[in-house]
């Protein structure tokens, strides 16, 4: 029977499994840098539109036709400046980070790709390009997956460990990822705070959920200051940390975008957050691939 997407409103219920995080950690925290700049829809790439999502121009739509040079510059800021600021914050603290990498974007900044490789960051594929996968045909999507793999093997020295679509997956995405093989997990799910096993055409497949809630995308909406973002993400961390201390440890994904939190007045919130978490005991700040491997070892798929 061909795999079909189904819904589950029950999940782990009132008694989720103990993840048994390394060292008895009460919470696993994974920071994700979404590396998208240079792969977004643009006139340059033949799309006939300028992307302005998650920028200072989000929702303004001032350009009715033709290129939006202001929005293009905002994307370029993320690659030229924002990446290096975020990279420095993590490197100064010797902390790991996961890259959700659009393959074409990484190709267009070899210096950043080399820094990612040298730092040992894991790369979860964010697609070949920043496109709506649910609008692609099955063959187009299969081609995008293969292009992403081939490209990232060249730019960062290893194939992507996982898969995560921009805008959301199609109904075919998970099946195509499993059929392609070589991926440890996908993160195309927002419905839990622990990894989940599923089966795709009778093969076990791991899902490591992501979060759009603990995310700097808030800066493109109702949130304006570093204090607001810091307190918002800190509160989420504090509740999860306390739940972990009471016997139900979880994982926390924190999503970052170079063209958003890479700006100084916002990056200071990330700096405060990293130092705040570092002051707590029993916190496992880790890469997404390490969470996946831990779950596979401690909670293997059941027959």
Image (cartoon, rainbow, N blue to C red):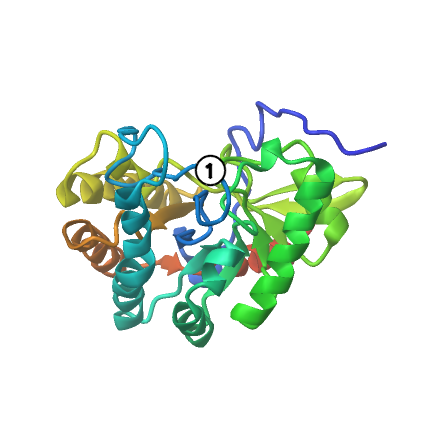
Whether residue 288 is visible: no
Q: Position of residue 118 (x, y in %)?
A: 43, 76
Q: Residue at x 29, y 34 (%)?
A: 58
The image quarter in which residue 228 lies: top left
Q: Is residue 93 visible?
A: yes
- Which residue is at a point 64% across and 56% down the rendered structure image? 147
65 over 122 or under it: above or below: above
Quarter of the image for residue 211 reads top left
**Which residue is labeled 1 in the image?**
48
From the viewer's side, name the closer residue of 188 and 64. Answer: 64
- How many marks do you count on the picture? 1
Q: Residues within 10 Å of mark 1 (few under 14, many from 20)?
A: few
In-front residue for pair 187/165: 165
Residue 40: % across, % down: 44, 46
Please indicate whether residue 254 sits to the left or right of residue 15 in the image.
left
- In this view of the protein, which residue sits in the foreground, 296 or 53? 53
Residue 198 image offset from top left, x and y in percent: 68, 39
- In the picture as drawn, the residue positioned furthest to the bottom comes out as 118
Q: Residue at x 74, y 52 (%)?
A: 180
Give left or right: position of 250 versus 272: right
Question: Quarter of the image containing the C terminus?
Answer: top right
As drawn, 164 above or below 87: above
Above/below status of 2 relative to 204: above
Q: How far from the left and from the top, in percent, is residue 34?
A: 41, 51
Q: Quadrant of the N terminus?
A: top right
* SS under mark 1: loop
> Would residue 128 appear left or right of 274 to someone viewing this image?
right
């Amino acid at each position: 029977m061909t795999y079909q997407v189904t819904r589950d409103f029950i999940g782990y219920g009132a008694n989720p499994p103990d993840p048994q995080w390394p060292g008895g950690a009460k919470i696993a925290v994974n920071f994700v840098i979404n590396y998208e700049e240079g792969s977004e829809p643009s006139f340059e790439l033949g799309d006939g539109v300028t992307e302005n999502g998650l920028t200072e121009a989000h929702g303004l739509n001032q350009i009715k036709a033709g290129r939006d040079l202001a929005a293009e510059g905002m994307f370029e800021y993320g690659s030229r400046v924002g990446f290096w600021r975020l990279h420095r914050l993590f490197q100064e603290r010797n902390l790991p980070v996961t890259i959700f990498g659009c393959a074409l974007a990484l190709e267009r900044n070899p210096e950043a790709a080399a820094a990612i490789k040298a730092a040992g960051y894991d790369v979860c594929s964010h697609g070949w390009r920043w496109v709506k996968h649910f609008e692609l045909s099955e063959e187009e999507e299969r081609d995008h997956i293969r292009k992403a793999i081939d490209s990232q093997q060249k730019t960062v020295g290893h194939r992507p460990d996982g898969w995560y679509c921009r805008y959301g997956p199609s109904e075919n995405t998970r099946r195509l990822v499993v059929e392609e093989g070589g991926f440890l997990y996908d993160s195309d799910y927002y419905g839990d705070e622990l990894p989940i096993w599923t089966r795709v055409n009778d093969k076990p497949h791991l899902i490591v959920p992501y979060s759009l809630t603990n995310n700097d995308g808030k800066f493109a909406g109702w949130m304006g200051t570093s204090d607001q973002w810091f307190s918002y993400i800190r509160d989420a961390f504090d509740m999860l940390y306390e739940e972990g201390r009471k016997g139900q440890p979880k994982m926390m994904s924190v999503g970052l975008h170079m063209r958003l939190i890479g700006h100084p007045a916002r990056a200071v919130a990330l700096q405060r957050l990293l130092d705040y978490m570092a002051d707590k005991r029993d916190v496992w700040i880790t890469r997404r691939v390490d969470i996946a491997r831990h779950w596979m070892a401690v909670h293997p798929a059941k027959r």
